[in-house]
């Protein structure tokens, strides 16, 4: 719609925003009218109309099999559009049109904003299945007529009331028509069933909806008065009412077709099962986070015990081995700590990499600075956990074997994501400017326990590749290529 309006019309951004508000609401008008809606806007030169939006009803057959958006119609070909635009009134005169052997009643509704007519809604009703209307259908049609008049007067949609139609109740979910005093004139079967779920034992018709709703909801002091006002339909608001046996979502729409408040529409939906599932998911998420939190605490306890044991060992080699184990356990604990703060099993790995870098830098025999460039991004837990251990081993290896006591240097971790959403890869390099590799060193076969762990995790568990080569100039460069799940955009 933005492109069509800006390409063909003279409407400004504020007018375009009004049309967006209208289109976010007009599914309701289409359903209540049992009719297709097409929004026509005059072109910049005033000689044609361009259709910028279209809506089909959920409550009846369509009048248009084709998509009308983008069509251009010369002025004069459809006199009802001209009359609605020029005279600023709803035009209903004229005989039905025949489209593919289907009779269609056409009406034109001017779209007014601040005294100006921006365009015209063509309302097209398929008359092939016309029959004697029921009470529900009569209520729908009367409500549609009131909304159409409000659109023609510039009183609908409501400014600042952007509606999410996927989350908001629709006419078919449940509809209640109130008079000017908030008394129920009509309640659809779905609406009545929803109120029975809340505990209502009687019919709704003839009762004040606000007072009835407040009585059904749990008593919360002053909130009851507020709830009574909301359910009376005096203001365009959405809200929920929860009782012991059910939850209903309501949306009130004041009706002012001629400027004065004549009543309200209240759309409602029974969301009891939806809210129950949401609570179950919240409980499940909280349980998973608590598990990660306890795993982190247990790992920290294990690390503390290993640290205590290391202090009591006289052998320098044994003490060093236990301290390495402490760092390995600590890297896993960092991942579980991060997972305990998230809603899903995915983590922002950049923070983990920085913490691992800081943890390993503390044990460097020299004065080695560590830094990270690039971005790891969001990783699944099954990748983040082994990767944290791999990063710990590589950094520890670089700082212990690349530099001697008192030597200065730098270890740089570089990360880069590449590929598509379905085939994403993470390229990582760990490069130092230390002593470099010994003569004849083969990283695929030789190496200490740390490098064996790296090879096993990268190639066996993560399905990636690992190589260690001399860096350009001085030092060592380790390169990892790991397949990962693409980030959500």
Image: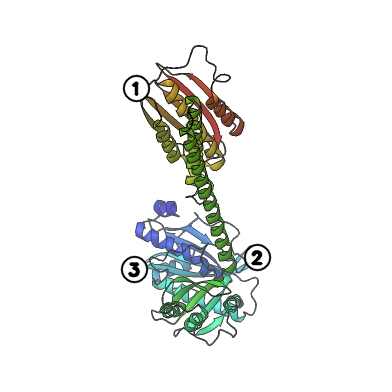
The extreme bottom residue here reads 206
Which one is nearer the viewer's eye here, 198 or 260?
198
Position of 42 with respect to 467 (left or right) is left
Q: CA distance from mark 2 to mark 1?
A: 93 Å
Which one is nearer the viewer's eye here, 8 or 339?
339
Q: Nearer the viewer, mark 3 or mark 1?
A: 1
Which one is nearer the viewer's eye here, 163 or 332?
332
Q: Nearer the viewer, mark 2 or mark 3?
A: 3
Secondary structure beneath label 1: loop
Question: Quick one: label 3, few (<14), some, or many (20+) residues within 10 Å?
Answer: few
Is residue 488 at least partly visible in the picture? Answer: no
Secondary structure beneath label 3: loop
Give residue 114's mark. 3
Q: What residue is drawn where x is 37% and y is 56%?
A: 45
In the picture, residue 132 is in which quadrant? bottom right
Q: Circle 1 sits on which residue?
A: 406
Q: CA distance from mark 2 to mark 3?
A: 40 Å
Spot occupied by residue 471 in the image (x, y as percentages of width and height): 44, 19
């Amino acid at each position: 719609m933005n492109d069509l309006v800006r390409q063909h019309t003279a409407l400004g951004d504020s007018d375009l925003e009004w049309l967006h508000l209208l289109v976010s609401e007009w599914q309701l008008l289409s359903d209540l009218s049992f009719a297709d809606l097409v929004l026509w806007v005059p072109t910049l030169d005033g000689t044609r109309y361009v259709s910028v939006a279209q809506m089909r009803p959920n409550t009846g057959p369509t009048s248009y099999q084709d998509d009308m958006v983008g069509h251009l119609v010369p002025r004069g070909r459809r006199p009802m559009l001209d009359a609605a635009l020029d005279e600023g009134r709803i035009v209903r005169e004229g005989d039905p049109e025949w489209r593919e052997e289907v009779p269609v009643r056409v009406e034109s509704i001017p779209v007014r904003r601040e005294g100006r007519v921006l365009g015209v809604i063509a309302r097209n009703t398929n008359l092939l299945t016309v029959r004697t209307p029921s009470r529900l259908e009569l209520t729908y049609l009367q409500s549609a007529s009131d909304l159409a008049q409000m659109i023609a007067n510039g009183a609908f949609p409501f400014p600042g009331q952007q509606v999410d139609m996927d989350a908001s109740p629709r006419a078919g979910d449940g509809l209640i028509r109130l008079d000017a005093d908030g008394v129920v004139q009509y309640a659809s079967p779905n609406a009545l069933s929803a109120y029975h779920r809340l505990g209502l034992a009687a019919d709704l018709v003839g009762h004040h909806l606000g007072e009835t709703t407040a009585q059904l909801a749990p008593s919360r002091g002053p909130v009851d008065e507020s709830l009574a006002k909301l359910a009376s339909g005096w203001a365009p608001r959405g809200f929920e009412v929860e009782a012991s046996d059910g939850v209903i979502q309501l949306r009130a729409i004041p009706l002012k077709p001629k400027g004065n408040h004549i009543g309200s529409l209240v759309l409602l939906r029974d969301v009891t099962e939806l809210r129950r599932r949401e609570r179950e998911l919240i409980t499940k998420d909280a349980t998973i986070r608590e598990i990660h939190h306890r795993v982190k605490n247990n790992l920290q306890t294990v690390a503390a015990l290993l640290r205590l044991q290391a202090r009591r060992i006289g052998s320098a080699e044994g003490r060093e081995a236990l301290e390495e184990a402490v760092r390995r356990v600590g890297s896993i604990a960092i991942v579980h700590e991060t997972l305990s703060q998230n809603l899903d099993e995915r983590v922002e790995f950049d923070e983990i990499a920085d913490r691992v870098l800081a943890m390993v830098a503390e044990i460097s025999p020299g004065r080695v600075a560590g830094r990270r460039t690039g971005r790891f991004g969001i990783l699944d837990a099954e990748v983040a956990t082994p990767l944290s251990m791999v990063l710990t081993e590589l950094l520890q290896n670089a700082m212990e074997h690349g530099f001697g006591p008192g030597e200065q240097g730098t270890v740089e971790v570089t990360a880069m994501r590449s590929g598509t959403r379905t085939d994403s890869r993470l390229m990582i390099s760990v490069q130092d400017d230390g002593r470099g590799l010994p003569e004849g060193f083969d990283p695929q076969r030789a190496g200490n326990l740390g490098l064996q762990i790296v090879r096993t995790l990268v190639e066996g568990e993560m399905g990636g590749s690992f190589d260690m080569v001399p860096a350009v100039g001085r030092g060592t460069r380790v390169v990892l290529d790991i397949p990962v799940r693409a980030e959500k955009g």
